[in-house]
Image (tube, rainbow, N blue to C red):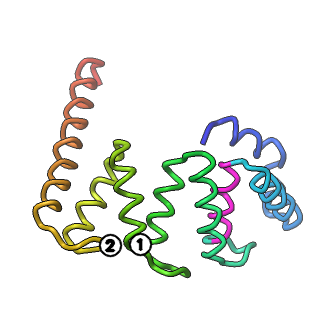
Amino acid sequence: MSNDDDDEYEDEYDDDEYDDHDVIKKRIETVIKKAEGGDVYSMKLMVTLYTNNEYFPRDYIAAQAWLRKAAKIGEDDEAYKRLAKLLKEGNGIAQDLEESFDINEQLMFNCDLDAMAEVGHAYKLGLGVPKDEKKAAFYIKQFFDIETDFMREDKENEKKKGV
């Protein structure tokens, strides 16, 4: 999400009016209109509205549909991650561990460390794939090795900056 997106939404409404139901309704209508127009950020907001909002009915099937659109249109890793999590948990929709695994595996190949950990976890527990302790150990070790390297680099950069 870019700061421009935040500014665009914030400029439309005064913070003092945030609790006003009419303003909230108007803001939701704006998000719906933008999402229907293909705005990926608004599509992801729709997911939040459908899964975690008192002003909107909970609808995990609609949330899943918006995530699929956002992921496909925007080739958006965040949307794919949220979709994989929704499919894994199966809250309000049919649980699909295989598709969740496939999404995480693709994200892992795009260098997403969280997805790598999810793939290792899936192999360890047999979530969407046959249990495979060797593959589980491999991916979990890779995750920790890479994460440790990042932590080491961060520490070295802090020393260089004198932090």
Position of residue 3 relative to residue 15, above or below, is above
Q: Is residue 49 magenta?
A: yes
- Report x, y in % for residue 34: 79, 51
Badge 1 local density, few (<14 within 10 Å), some, or many (20+)? many
Total residue callouts: 2
In the image, what residue occupies the spot 79% across and 51% down? Answer: 37
Instruction: From the image, give the main secondary structure of the stretch colored magenta.
Output: helix
Q: Is residue 114 magenta?
A: no
Q: 106 or 23, which is in the foreground?
A: 106
In the image, what residue occupies the spot 81% across and 41% down? Answer: 11
The answer for how far apart the CA atoms under marks 2 and 1 are is 9 Å
Image quarter of residue 67: bottom right
Of helix, strand and loop, which one carries label 2? loop
In the image, what residue occupies the spot 22% across and 67% down? Answer: 123
Stretch in magenta: 40-50
* Labelled pair 2, 1 in contact (Cβ < 8 Å): yes
Position of residue 100 relative to residue 33, above or below, is below
Of helix, strand and loop, which one carries label 1? helix
Q: Which residue is mark 2?
A: 128
In the image, which disc is placed on residue 88?
1
Amino acid type for the residue under numbered disc 2: Gly
Amino acid type for the residue under numbered disc 1: Lys
